Amino acid sequence: MNLRVSKSLIGWIFILLATILISLFYFYPMLQAFILSFKSGMGASLQFVGLDNYIRLFNDPVALIAIRNTFIYLIFQVPLMIIIAMFFSVLLNSPNLKFKGFFRTAIFLPSVISLVAYSVIFKYLFSTDGLVNEFLLSISIISEPIEWLMDPFWAKVVIIIAITWRWTGYNMIFYLAGLQNVDHSVYEAARIDGANVVQQFFYITIPMLKPIILFTAITSTIGTLQLFDEPMNITMGGPGNETLTISQYIYNLSFEYTPDFGYAAAVSFIIVVLTVIFSIIQFKLGGERD
């Protein structure tokens, strides 16, 4: 009995330590940020303004543009990345494919590259005299250089391409790990029953990967809602705030414009609310009971 009590006490001590650290470094800053969102100004000049920051948020055209841009990245980039990651995972899970280790490493490698470094590389690749325009001109697809970073539409396309290139390999690893836990006899039985490759993918692979798809969809959604490095380093939010994201706008409110930490905190809680909403939707669509 004493040994059981001792083990239980040790367990509670470990849990208590983790709870204290999580509360101190996660929940306490969140609480302070929430309190700060009801104030305006900075430093000693902070004043309580009630709901003024939230009212201002819904009447702020720049904030609404940032929310719209973030939604565009989310709607197009997350499904595209998940589909490509699943395609590569199925391809690289083939037992007949040679040099699988090399291809897996090559596709995963972009996810370990510095965010700032690869963003700068994309900025130069898609500049007016960059390699992308030179290549397209050399094969006569375009007759004049495309202003990738100066056109609102193409600037968003560049951001989406950059994010997809960076994170596809990261999500592919999760799908690949899930596929390796699927017994090959399931696919063999399906082939014997006359199921082709497409039918196997939709009726075996996707149902088997459903929990992993839900996980990657939620984490990718959270990451896209917090998108900062790519638009900051590739386009600086331009042209005309057309690639500005919520996180970048929070940064501008805190450090680029006249600092207003209270309003910046209020804007940051838009990300929290959107994350909760999209997570609930994805859990419902994915079937949280599974």
Image (tube, helix red, strand yellow):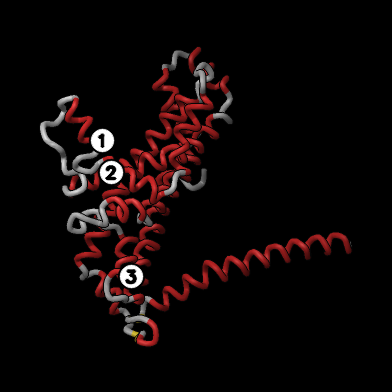
Residue 252, located in which quarter of the rendered image? Answer: bottom left
Cα separation between marks 1 and 3: 34 Å
| Amino acid marked by disc 1 | Leu
Question: Taking 136 as reference, is 256 left or right?
Answer: right
Q: Name the one closer to the observer, 257 or 92.
A: 257
| Amino acid marked by disc 3 | Phe
Q: Residues within 10 Å of mark 2 (few under 14, many from 20)?
A: some
Q: Quadrant of the N terminus?
A: bottom right
Q: Name the one closer to the observer, 107 or 17.
A: 107
| Percent of width and height locating residue 227 | 36, 54
Secondary structure state at the residue bearing disc 3: helix
Report which residue position mark 1 lands on. 131
The residue drawn where x is 25% and y is 65% is: 63
| Amino acid marked by disc 2 | Tyr
Q: Residues within 10 Å of mark 1 (few under 14, many from 20)?
A: some
| Percent of width and height locating residue 102 | 50, 27
Whether the residues at callouts 2 and 1 have beta carbons within 8 Å, the answer is yes
Report which residue position mark 3 lands on. 255
